[in-house]
Image (tube, helix red, strand yellow):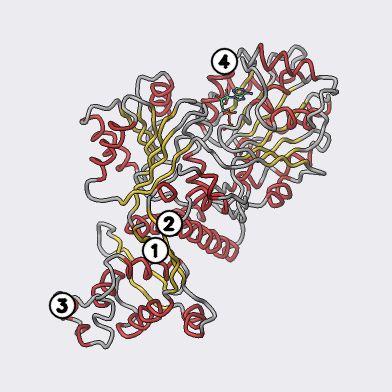
Amino acid sequence: WRSADFTWANKLETYNRKVFGNHSFRPNQREVINATMSGHDVFVLMPTGGGKSLTYQLPALISPGITLVVSPLVSLIQDQIMHLLQANIPFAYLSANMEWVQQQEILRELLSDACKYKLLYVYPEKVAKSDILLRQLDALYSRESLARIVIDEAHCVSQWGHDFRPDYQGLGILKQKYPATPVLALTATATASVKEEDVVQALGLKNCIIFRQSFNRSNLWYSVVPKTKKCLDDIDNFIKENHFDECGIIYCLSRMDCEKVAEKLQECGHKASFYHGSMDPRQRSFVQQQWSKDEVNIICATVAFGMGINKPDVRFVIHHSLPKSIEGYHQECGRAGRDGLRSSCVLYYNYSDYIRVKAMLGQGVADQSAYTPGSRRNVVSTTDRILETNIENLLCMVNYCENDSECRRLLQLIHFGEKFNASDCQKTCDNCSKMLNSVARNVSGIARQLVDLVKLTGPQYSMAHIMEVYRGSLSMNVKKYRHDTLSLHGAGKHMPKGEASRILRHLVIKDILVEDVKKSDLYGTVSSILRINESKACKLYSGEQEIILRFCTTA
Ligand code: ADP
C-alpha cells in the first residue's frame, strides 16, 4: 500500500503539504489512505497521536461526495472542529443539543447539488435514533455520494473493553445498508480482550485490511510513585521541579478531586483549571479553549477530558488516582508528548484507591444496565460480565503499580500483545532506571500461611486487620477478637514491612483471596473484607499454582 502508482498519489502529497501543513506522512498514514481510497474496508490501530485524523480528512477532501464520521465525544468533535476550521475544510456536525431548524438545514444541504460539506460528524446515538439522518444517508448512497464511513474510537463497540458504549453496537447497520461504501474504523486501543476481529465483526466489515502499529512511545517516561497524604504537595513539587509553566493534564477519579486538585495547584501558583462531566457543555468548552490557547497550563480532569485532544506540547500526564485499566492508562498517557519531545507520565498509587475505584465500577455498571435493552435476564448476565471484565482490567492495573522491578514499557506492551525487549527502554521508566537489582523469589509458603490465616479468622476481616495479626500486632482490635491467640499470630513478624502486604495484595490480584467491598455508612464510606476463593486456593495448596514475585535488593 506504500506504492506511489495510485492515480491520486500526487494529490495526496500536495494536499498534505498545502492544506494540512505537513512535510511528510507519518508511519502508515499513506498506506491507510491508499487502502481506503481503493474502496476497501480498513481497520486502523494506531497509538494516540499517531495521526489518525489525516487518514480520513485527506481522502474526504479529494473524493467526490460526503464522508460520514461517527465520533463518540463532545470534546473530540470540538477539537476536530477547531482544526477543520483552521485548515478551511468544509464540514458539518449534528449534535443532540442543536436547534431542530439548524439540523434540518444541514440535512437539506447534504442533498443539494452544490453541497458545501465534505465531512459530516455525528454522535453514535444519532445514527441509531435519527430516522431522518438515515433517510438522508439512503438518498446520498443511492446517488453514489456517500464517499466513506469513518468510525472513530471503534473499540467502543467491544463489550470487553473499558470504553464500551451500547450505541456503538448499532453501527453495524451502516455497512448493512450501504455495502458499497468503504468503512474506515480507527482506534488507539486493542488488547488481548478487545480483539480486532470483534470490532471488525460487530461493524460488519468485509475483507477488511488491517493496519497495526507499535504502541511503544519512546519519548514518554513512566513512573509510579507511592501516594501519601502529601500527594498534592508532591505533585506541586514535581511540576515545579520538572515542568514549571509547561502544559499538563492531571487525571482524577471524581469531580470533587478535580476541583480540589485544581484549587490546590492554583494556590501554589500554577495556571490550573478543572474539567469534568458534571459541568455544563458551555463551561467545558470554555475550559478546553482556555487550555488550547495556553491561558491555562494544567487541566485537572476526569477521563471525560482528552479523547482526541490535539495539543502537541503536553509535557506531563499525572494520574492522581488509579486508572481503570492498562489500555485506559496507556491512552491517557498518550496525550503527552505528541510532538515527539520528552514528556513525563507519573502515576500516584496507593492500594486504597483500588477499593474506591472498584466500588465506583460496581455503581457505574448498575447505572448503565438501566439503559441496556433486552430481557431482564440478559440485562443481568451482561451486567455481570461487564463488571467482571472491568474488575479484571482494574486488577491488571493494580498489578502494574505493585510491580516495582519490571520495565513499565514491557508491562504495558505485553498487554497490547506486543513483544518488547526491556533493554530497549534505555532506563526511561522508574523500574529500569533504579540502580537496584531484583531477584525472583518463590513465596508460595508465605502465601499459604496468609490464606490459612484468613481461614482461621473467618471471612469478616479487612486486609489491614489480617496484616496486623500476621505481623504480631497486639492492637486493641486484635485483642478484642482474640486473634493474638491464633497459631499464626506473629508468623510474619520477621519479614520486612511491606513485603507481606504485597504478597497479600497479590493473592487478591490472583483471585485466590476475594475482597468484598461494602458501603459501611450513610456517607458511603467503603470498607472491604477478605474471603477465600476455594477453587483457586486449592491450586495453591496442591502446588499447581506457585506465587513468584520479584523483590528489589540493593546492588
Ligand atoms: P490521533 O487521532 O491518532 O490521536 P491526530 O490525528 O489527532 O492523532 O494527530 C496528532 C497530531 O499529529 C496533530 O497535531 C496532527 O496535526 C499531527 N499530525 C498528523 N499527521 C501528521 C504528519 N504527517 N506530519 C506532521 N504532523 C502530523
Q: Which residue is mark 3?
A: 474
Of the 4 image quadrants, the one containing the N terminus is: top right
Give coordinates of residue 339: x percent, y percent. Answer: 51, 26
Camera-side mark, 2 or 3: 2
As shown in the figure, which amino acid type bears the numbered disc 2? Answer: Ser
Please tell me whether mark 3 sits on a helix, a strand or a loop. Answer: loop
Give coordinates of residue 199: x percent, y percent. Answer: 68, 48
Q: Quadrant of ligand 1?
A: top right
Relative to 132, 125 lies left or right: left
- Which comes before the other along the chain, label 4 or label 1? 4
The picture quadrant where one finds residue 376 is: bottom right
Q: Which residue is mark 4?
A: 85
Per the model, the C-alpha gap separating discs 3 and 4 is: 68 Å
Q: Residues within 10 Å of mark 3 (few under 14, many from 20)?
A: some
As shown in the figure, which amino acid type bears the numbered disc 1? Answer: Phe
Per the model, the C-alpha gap separating discs 1 and 2 is: 7 Å
Q: Which residue is mark 2?
A: 405
As shown in the figure, which amino acid type bears the numbered disc 3? Answer: Leu
As shown in the figure, which amino acid type bears the numbered disc 4? Answer: Leu
Q: Residues within 10 Å of mark 1 (few under 14, many from 20)?
A: some
Give coordinates of residue 272: x percent, y percent. Answer: 31, 29
Relative to 19, 209 lies left or right: right
Q: Is residue 349 above or below residue 139?
A: below
